[in-house]
Amino acid sequence: MLKPRQMSRVLVVGHKGILEGTVNALYKTNLFHIEDFIEDESGLKIGKPFGDVDTLSQKLIKIRSIATFLGIKDEACNTQKADAVMQKLNSTLDMLEKDVSSKTEKKVEIESKIKELESLRRDVLPFVGIPLNLDLYRGYESLAAFAGVIKGEVEAEISNITGSYELFSDPKSGSIVLFVPKAYADAVSKSLSGFGYRELKVPDVAGMPSDILSMVESQKESLLKQIESIDSDVIALKSKYLDFIQASNEMLSIETAKSEAPLRIATSESTFLIEGWVPSDSYRALEEEVTRATDGRAFVTQQEIEHKDEPNIPVEYDNPKIVRPLEEIMNLYARPRYKELDPTAIMFLSFPLFYGMILGDIGYALILFILALLVKKMVKSDAVKPIMNILIYCQISTAIFGILYGEFLGFPLASLEVHHGSEVIVQPGLIPGFSTINLFASPFGGEMITYPVHRTHLVMTLIVATALIGLIHINIGYVLGFINENRKHGFSAALLEKGSWLVIEIGILLCALGYANVLPSVMTYAGILIFLIGFVMLLKGEGIKGPVELPSLLSNSLSYTRIIAVGLSSIYIASTINNIVFEMMWPDSFGIMTVFAILVFIFGHALNTVLSIIAPGLHALRLQYVEFFGKFYEGGGRKYNPFGYIRKYTEEK
Amino acid sequence: MADVATATVLFDAAGMKAIGAGLAVGLTGLASAIAEKEIGTAAIGAMAENEALFGKGLILTVIPETIVIFGLVVALLIS
């Protein structure tokens, strides 16, 4: 906790003859983070891959493209024996490839046929209203044929030009077909253009348009059926070979990774040298495994970590299981550096705390809690699970604050007396007989602190309270920053850069208390003096950047007032929905309006539920990332990525 | 004279407070929106290049949010 896992720098050296055995042993332990070797002047070269990598990777590409075509991605299936898969790999792969590629080709062919049919249909459609064989549209020596769309009546105009014509028209679509002697073609064409004539392409087929249309439809239907049958074949193929494909994909990936490993390793003529990182507590296990696999012929040793190596040390979180989901939030920002504090455990407390303080509603907490549980049950994805766990943590905190605030879906649980001048109005609560208890007067805004805490009536007090919480949170950040800086650059740098802020704060506090006559007034001057000392320290520690940042002390802590501000907006949305439903829409007797009101209630609260994930989540996250992390966190550590794999679909022997 | 009377009713202290509170939230909301618009587009552009920048992009995008929060706090203080 609070510190990434401790790493050891490990060197494995041996004769090239045992390289493959060593690599297999390292792979099996799944602990060793290989430091890729880059060729330099030392004379060492990168190694040559084992076996026939090209064939292996070709097979891998084939199996992956088949998996893509069949739509297989990480699905649960039975594990297979690695040997059995290996034996039938070649034959099954060939068979599958042939099958899949023929299916793909056929599907593409059918799809292009369907496209052709559709374009024919588009072309024929304008002629449907004209009962004329499409063959009759062309092939005349002395006749000119016009086929197109026009606007208006054209017949009178044509009969003025020539008496010998034949006109077919479809008033619905506005398409016409006109035959005139070729001699009049130019004159007719001119007069047609006066009617907005647009020529249509006559499809190159014979037959009555309506017959062609029905033929197109029936052909399309049979093609669609063929596609359907291919699709069902694909599904059958998928369910039959799901196990095999996933197992062989996994196995080939493992084999490729192993045989490509020498490309990351330094070799000389007859020796190899592997550098890398291992979690210190697992070093023994690694050493034992390698010694066992090579009969002690490989030399495994731990090396001292030099200061310049530090940015290269891979970082692995070291948190208790319950805190681990929060690592996702850390990764979203940046993984901590090796020597840095890992604030995941602090986030585990503060993130749900702020989320709960913002939302604080028993109703929404229950809805989201159940929702998160359901999603976690239904979706078996490794990416979704931690997010849902975080959501569950947040809802627990929301429920606790919901009890403190006494809110359920925007309704107050307890009744409250509100003084309006001399009038006293009692606002009813959801639980009859549960009335608000006055505890003590708040020092701000003349408000009374009560149980349950009615946020809408304690705005001033809560603004001050949240800003104070912010101040505490920020100061935790400064203390963590002090520790980080102390580790990295020593005590004096830490004191000047981070300690100065604490000194400045003490100065301001003393000054303010002295000014307000809480302390003797001489403390005002002492406060100013301490402030100035802090200021000079800051100037020395951070340079001119420090004083420029000084106002952030105020703006950062005021930024925490969003806890109450966003919370209030969520209450107001909820209570507005409740108002609309129960004050404005709810009828005296049961009827259609009742159903409508219930619908508004459900949809309104569904909307607010969605907002209840986004708004408090983002704001709580932002308080961590901007206000808190800004004080101490750098991040940017390398991910610990051990050489190895946890088999999911296959088992060895 | 009736007009003056209506005007006084409209512009009594409570009304002016409400207008002030509305302006405080509305104008700061606009300000945040304008600022976030530009940062958001740039952040999405950066994310398209490198998805790991999501965290940083999110932070930079929500920084101007503080403006509207201050507006909201001021509005609460007024009313």
Image (cartoon, coloured by chain):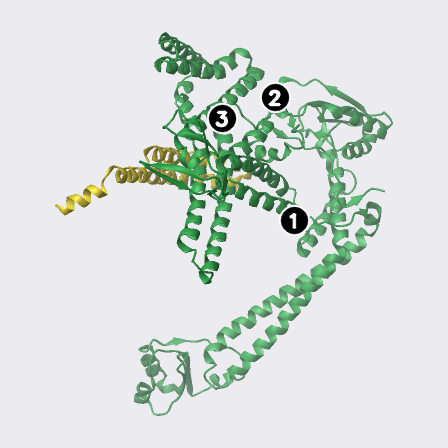
Give the class, few, some or many, for how many residues have Cα within 10 Å of label 2's Cα (few <14, many ≥20): some
Location of mark 3 (residue): A630
Give the class, few, some or many, for how many residues have Cα within 10 Å of label 3's Cα (few <14, many ≥20): some
Report the quarter where the C terminus of chain A lies: top right
Q: What's the residue at 73%, 43% (across, down)? A: A253
In front of the other: A573 or A245? A573
Q: What's the residue at 72%, 57% (across, down)? A: A238
Which secondary structure, mark 2?
loop
Which secondary structure, mark 1?
helix
**Mark drawn on residue A425:** none
Q: Amino acid at mark 3?
A: Gly
Q: Position of residue A390 (x, y in %)?
A: 59, 37
Location of mark 1 (residue): A378
Q: Share a chain, discs 2 and 1?
A: yes
Q: Which chain is green?
A: A
Q: Which chain is yellow?
A: B
Of callouts 2 and 1, the N-terminal one: 2
Direction from residue A311 to residue A276 in the image, left or right: right
* Cα distance in 3D space between marks 2 and 3: 17 Å
Q: What's the residue at 39%, 11% (across, down)? A: A519
**Mark drawn on residue A339:** 2
The answer to whether residue B53 shows anywhere in this view is no
Q: Position of residue A332 (x, y in %)?
A: 56, 35
Question: Mark 3 — on which chain does it sit?
Answer: A
Number of marks in the image? 3
Q: Amino acid at mark 1?
A: Met
Q: Is residue A341 above or below residue A136?
A: above
Report the quarter where the N terminus of chain A lies: top right
Front label number (2 vs 1): 1
The answer to whether residue A543 shows anywhere in this view is yes
Front label number (2 vs 3): 3
Question: Mark 2 — on which chain does it sit?
Answer: A
